[in-house]
Amino acid sequence: MTSNNDTLFARAQLTTPGGVNSPVRAFRSVGGTPRFITRAEGPYFWDADDRRYIDYIGSWGPAIVGHAHPAVIKAVQEAAARGLSFGAPTQGEIEIAEEICKLVPSIEQVRLVSSGTEATMSALRLARGATGRDKIVKFEGCYHGHADSLLVKAGSGLLTFGNPTSAGVPEDFVKHTLVLDYNNAQQLEDAFKDMGDQIACVIVEPVAGNMNLVRATPEFLQTMRRLCTQYGTVLIFDEVMCGFRVALGGAQALYDIKPDITALGKVIGGGLPVAAFGGRADLMGHMAPLGPVYQAGTLSGNPVAVAAGMSTLKLIQEPGFYTRLGTQTSKLVNGLSAAAKEAGVTFSGDAIGGMFGLYFAAAVPDSYATVMASNKDLFNKFFHAMLDAGVYLAPSAFEAGFVSAQHDDAVIEATIAAARGAFAQLV
Ligand code: KE4
């Protein structure tokens, strides 16, 4: 029987490339028909056939308090009734900026934008403008949005400059981007010895979530901080995903490392388009209209989006929020690991705050190479078995998963029960 999802997907492809507005949604990595979501509430969403799923992408991170949280919806409704966008400053922008600076002490000044891509792109431009240097360092497996100079894969040699990962990105746009191995402190040391005084910035996901979940080692981040300080290089933590997701103060609070600039997104918009970049006041002072680094945005600091973000930031500060969130995420991962073991399936999992990684591999990966060695085919079979059982995981073996405050014990236990059936189908 043709599902409404099939019908909508066929129709969507007539007017939108791949039928989606962001590639990962097309299910190309896992195969099958993407689910067209009609509504969401708490830990659930419903597709076009009115089938309910336990949702573990949470809009790829923003839905940390659960979908359609009454307080967030009320804040959005009240803001919308006062007008949608003014193109002029509002008090709400001051309030959310003050909240971000309070919660992330390394951020002394912050600029709001509308997407994580804008946040990291602007942070790179700021680093280059403030240092007068062109070279940047990123790491294989980290994704920072789709700005040209960040769509780069590792070059042929260990310390050679990168090659574009996308058509339409001229070689010239990436010739200053050096792509190194995540968690390889020695290689980073060597790169700085080789060209440290030419490097404008290092940008890193301090907890990586775009090659699946891979934690940085403390030594890797400590080495990065030491070298950036030594060579006058700007250290950018891309916390668009892990910020307010792994801890209230983000990964920088967990690792107790102070970056120079932080990129934020997702949770700070609560599901609406708010992202930000901010950090040391002396660096942010280079931004127009104060200084020569230009960045602008019609909908930057949009009052309705800021209302959703501010409401979410208030809710995550409730006493015990992250303790409860971390407990639920650990229960999920431990339960899935036990179910896999019972079924005799090679599997491991990791959980940090409200973020988790599932790996069809014997051990939790600590690098791009090890995560890429996990069994993608088994994941894809598991993904579809779970989808059929009403559990929606990220539609790729190389994405992290997300738990909300509404994923209570009953939801976690239902997920584990579904997984027992799914794992049994793999053997
Ligand atoms: P956006 O431009 O998608 O708002 O943010 C880009 C970005 C920047 N930095 C990090 C660490 C990110 O994870 C992202 C976006 N994350 C993906 C999830 N893999 C968004 C999902 C999608 O691309 O549709």
Image (cartoon, helix red, strand yellow):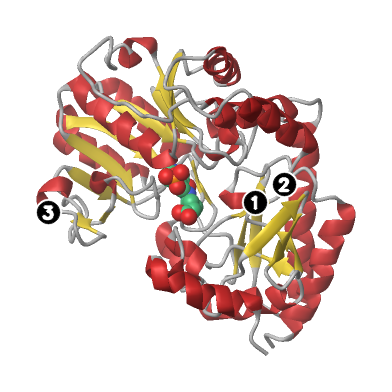
Q: Quadrant of residue 284?
A: top left
**Residue at horizontal 77 percent and vertical 42 percent from the top:** 405
Q: Quadrant of residue 309?
A: top right
Q: Quadrant of residue 33?
A: bottom right
In the visual, does 148 lie left or right of 32? left
| Real-space Cα separation, disc 1 to disc 3, in angstroms | 36 Å
| Local crowd size for mark 3, using a 10 Å CA cut-off: few (<14), some (14–19), many (≥20) | some
In the visual, does 368 lie left or right of 289? right
- The answer to whether residue 399 of the structure is visible from this angle is yes
Residue 67, label in figure: 2
Sequence-wise, the earlier of marks 2 and 3 is 2
In the visual, does 108 lie left or right of 269? left
Sequence-wise, the earlier of marks 1 and 3 is 1
Decide: is 360 above or below 190: below
- The answer to whether residue 33 of the structure is visible from this angle is no
Depth check, mark 2 against mark 1: the one in front is 2
Q: Which residue is mark 3?
A: 171
Label 2 with label 1: CB-CB less than 8 Å:
yes
Residue 115 in percent (x, y) is at 44, 39
**Residue at horizontal 45 percent and vertical 69 percent from the top:** 19
Decide: is 78 above or below 156: above
Give the number of callouts: 3
Q: Which residue is mark 1?
A: 58
Q: Amino acid at mark 2?
A: His
The quadrant the C terminus occupies is bottom right
| Real-space Cα separation, disc 2 to disc 1, in angstroms | 8 Å
